[in-house]
C-alpha cells in the first residue's frame, strides 16, 4: 500500500508534465531541456567513470524525466521517427538504471551502455533533425518544425 501511495503522486506529476509539454513547450523550453540533458549526460558519464554510481543513477533519472517530456513533445508534433528515437533512448536509460542499481555495478558495462545511449539516441536525433555542433550551437534543420 505504501508503494502505491508513493507512485500515484509521482505518476500524476509526470503525467502533468507530459500533458503540459504537449501544448506549451516553446523552442526556448526545448533548448533548456536539451541543455539539461547535455549536463545530465556529462555528469552521468563522469560519475560512472569515477565509480560514483549513485550520482550516475541520479543523472539517469533526470534524463528519464526529460526524455518523457520530449516523447510527448514529438508525439504532439506527430514526428513518429523522433518518438521512436526517444522511446529507444528511454529503453536504454532503463537498462542503464538497472545496471547502476545492481548490488555490484559492472563499471565497464555501465560505460558501454552510457556510450550506446548517447550515440544511438542523441546522435540519431541530431543527425535527423539538427545541424551545427557543440561549439557553434545546434539548431533545427529547415522544415522540421
Image (cartoon, rainbow, N blue to C red):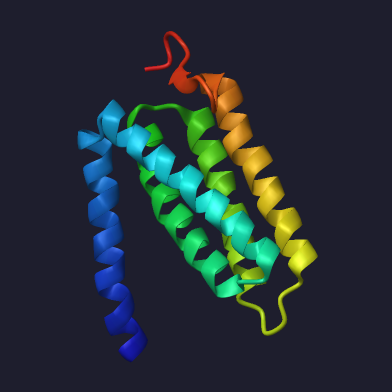
Above or below — where is 129 with respect to 51? Answer: above
Residue shown at 20%/35% (left/top)?
A: 24
**Count of numbered labels shown in the rendering:** 0
State the residue lying farthest toward the bottom: 1
Q: Give the side of residue 11 with respect to residue 127, left or right.
A: left
Q: x%, y% of residue 138? A: 48, 23
**Closest to the observer, 45 or 26:** 45
Above or below — where is 136 with respect to 4? Answer: above
Which quadrant of the rendered structure holds the C terminus? top left
Above or below — where is 108 with respect to 75? Answer: below
Above or below — where is 113 with respect to 134? Answer: below
Q: x%, y% of residue 66? A: 40, 49
State the residue lying farthest toward the right: 108
Residue shown at 34%/38% (left/top)?
A: 32
Residue shown at 33%/75% (left/top)?
A: 7
Would residue 140 be seen by someone viewing this image from the given angle? Answer: yes
Q: Give the side of residue 25 with respect to residue 52, left or right.
A: left
**Closest to the observer, 51 or 101:** 51
Residue shown at 63%/71% (left/top)?
A: 100
Q: x%, y% of residue 37? A: 46, 45
Amino acid at each position: 500500500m505504501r508503494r502505491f501511495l508513493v507512485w500515484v503522486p509521482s505518476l500524476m506529476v509526470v503525467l502533468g508534465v507530459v500533458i503540459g509539454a504537449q501544448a506549451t513547450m516553446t523552442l526556448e523550453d526545448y533548448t533548456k531541456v536539451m541543455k539539461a540533458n547535455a549536463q545530465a549526460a556529462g555528469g552521468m558519464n563522469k560519475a560512472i567513470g569515477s565509480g560514483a554510481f549513485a550520482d550516475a543513477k541520479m543523472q539517469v533519472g533526470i534524463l528519464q524525466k526529460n526524455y518523457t517530456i520530449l516523447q510527448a513533445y514529438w508525439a504532439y508534433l506527430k514526428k513518429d521517427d523522433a518518438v521512436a528515437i526517444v522511446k529507444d533512448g528511454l529503453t536504454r536509460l532503463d537498462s542503464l538504471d538497472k545496471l547502476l542499481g545492481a548490488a555490484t555495478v559492472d563499471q565497464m558495462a555501465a560505460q558501454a551502455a552510457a556510450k550506446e545511449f548517447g550515440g544511438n539516441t542523441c546522435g540519431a536525433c541530431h543527425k535527423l533533425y539538427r545541424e551545427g555542433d557543440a561549439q557553434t550551437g545546434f539548431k533545427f534543420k529547415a522544415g522540421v518544425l
